[in-house]
Image (spheres, rainbow, N blue to C red):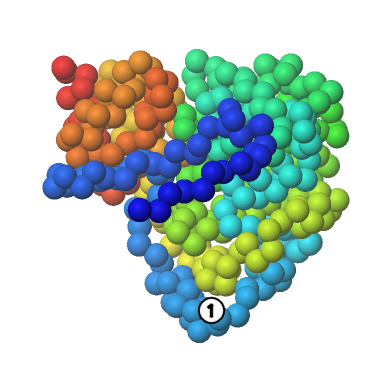
């Protein structure tokens, strides 16, 4: 029997207290049929045109992808009304966020964000030697922007605004963000993470295009993982002003956006595909409203979600509630002793969520 040699490598001290990202739990392999609604994945199959584009791209899989992503950046630049050079691509918006941290944050520099928010934020900040400044959410599950503004110091380099907020669901308005930006020094970058933007009510969705034009310290983060259903291919991007866009290119991992991912993203931008995705988004919004209404009738008081999920603020009961759902066919995402998130998925899963949530209330 071989033995492992002694490991005397010197790891960075910052890793000692760094948590590990916990993905949505998969279904247990115990013979019980379950819906996995723990990862905010799309419940729709790929749009046929997107699937075909991915298959066609595989003929060139022996070649490196276009590292510059010229065609995709040009298409996205046109959509956002910016130069293609202002689009930074990577394998998911989480990777673009990591690039932001690498470009802006040195040892001991601070990054301000709401908590609880996207699970990866403290990992990305701590992993690069930065200091996370976590500002508690309001009781409603919303960002406390006044407290976030007050948390900015001379060491702050970046502020992360997740809207709609994952995992709680509330969103920020244009007026709220504009009022917040007045309080932020113009050398501090404010990243608006809109991974769930497409699920927001279009009538009240954040006016990020105008915000971006008016503020040189704002960067927008988007993903193709949610509505477009490319979570397995990994493609996200930032819309940045020129100087920051150049910096993101300097720190980005080369070839991070694969050829199949770029092909799928380009196909997702075709008018006929966007029309189908709009129909899917409307269906999710309708289902979310139905689920929230039904849960409200049961007596639940949930944050008002604009994402493709709902959040149960059950506190200390979170592990028990998640286990209760799991035993009855639903895999949800529990966040310690704070709350539990459930994705709006296919109608059968949503009906089961309503049924199980009602059973929990009647215990």
Q: Nearer the viewer, residue 27 or 49?
A: 27
**Dot 1 crowding, Cα within 10 Å, few <14, some 14–19, many 20+:** few
Locate residue 363 relative to residue 339 in the image: left or right. left
Q: Which residue appears at 69% of the width and 39% of the height?
A: 128
Horizontal and vertical percent position of residue 286: 36, 43
Rendered-image quadrant of the C terminus: top left
Horizontal and vertical percent position of residue 97: 65, 45
Vertically, is 85 above or below 303? Answer: below
Spot the residue most to the bottom. Answer: 59
Horizontal and vertical percent position of residue 111: 71, 30
Q: Which residue appears at 61% of the width and 34% of the height?
A: 15
Marker count (numbered) = 1
Q: Which quadrant of the structure image shows residue 332?
A: top left
Q: Is residue 2 visible?
A: yes
Q: Nearer the viewer, residue 30 or 344?
A: 30
Q: Which residue appears at 24% of the width and 44% of the height?
A: 28
Spot the residue most to the left. Answer: 31
Horizontal and vertical percent position of residue 172: 60, 31
Vertically, is 239 above or below 266? Answer: above
Locate residue 52 relative to residue 223 in the image: left or right. left
Q: Which residue appears at 31% of the width and 45% of the height?
A: 26
Q: Is residue 178 visible?
A: no
Q: Give the structural element (helix, strand or loop) at label 1.
A: loop
Which residue, given by chain and number where applicable, does mark 1 sit on?
61
Vertically, is 162 above or below 41? Answer: above
Locate residue 39 relative to residue 270 in the image: left or right. left
Q: Which quadrant of the structure image shows residue 343?
A: top left
């Amino acid at each position: 029997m071989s033995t492992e040699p002694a490991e005397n490598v010197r790891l960075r001290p910052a890793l000692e207290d760094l948590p590990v990202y916990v993905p949505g739990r998969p279904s247990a392999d115990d013979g019980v049929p379950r819906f996995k609604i723990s990862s905010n994945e799309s419940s729709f199959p790929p749009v046929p045109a997107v699937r075909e584009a991915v298959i066609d791209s595989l003929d060139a899989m022996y070649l490196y992808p276009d590292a510059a992503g010229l065609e995709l950046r040009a298409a996205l630049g046109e959509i956002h009304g910016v130069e293609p050079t202002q689009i930074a691509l990577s394998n998911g918006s989480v990777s673009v966020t990591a690039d932001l941290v690498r470009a802006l944050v040195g040892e001991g520099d601070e990054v301000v964000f709401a908590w609880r928010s996207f699970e990866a934020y403290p990992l990305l900040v701590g992993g690069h030697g930065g200091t996370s400044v976590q500002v508690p959410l309001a009781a409603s599950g919303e960002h406390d922007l006044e407290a976030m503004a007050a948390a900015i110091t001379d060491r702050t380099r970046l502020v992360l605004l997740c809207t709609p907020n994952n995992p709680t669901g509330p969103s920020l308005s244009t007026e709220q963000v504009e009022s917040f930006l007045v309080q932020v020094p113009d050398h501090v970058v404010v990243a608006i993470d809109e991974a769930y933007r497409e699920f927001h009510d279009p009538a009240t969705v954040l006016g990020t295009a105008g915000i971006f034009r008016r503020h040189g310290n704002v960067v927008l983060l988007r993903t193709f993982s949610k509505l477009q259903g490319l979570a397995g291919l990994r493609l996200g991007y930032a819309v940045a002003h020129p100087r920051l866009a150049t910096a993101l290119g300097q720190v980005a991992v080369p070839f991070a956006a694969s050829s199949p991912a770029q092909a799928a993203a380009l196909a997702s931008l075709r008018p006929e595909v966007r029309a189908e995705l709009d129909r899917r988004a409307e269906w999710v919004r309708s289902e979310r409203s139905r689920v929230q209404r039904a849960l409200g009738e049961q007596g639940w008081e949930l944050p008002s979600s604009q994402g493709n999920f709902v959040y149960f603020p059950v506190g200390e009961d979170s592990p028990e509630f998640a286990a209760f759902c799991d035993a009855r066919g639903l895999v949800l995402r529990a966040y310690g002793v704070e709350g539990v998130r459930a994705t709006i998925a296919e109608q059968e899963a949503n009906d089961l969520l309503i049924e199980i949530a009602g059973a929990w209330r009647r215990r």
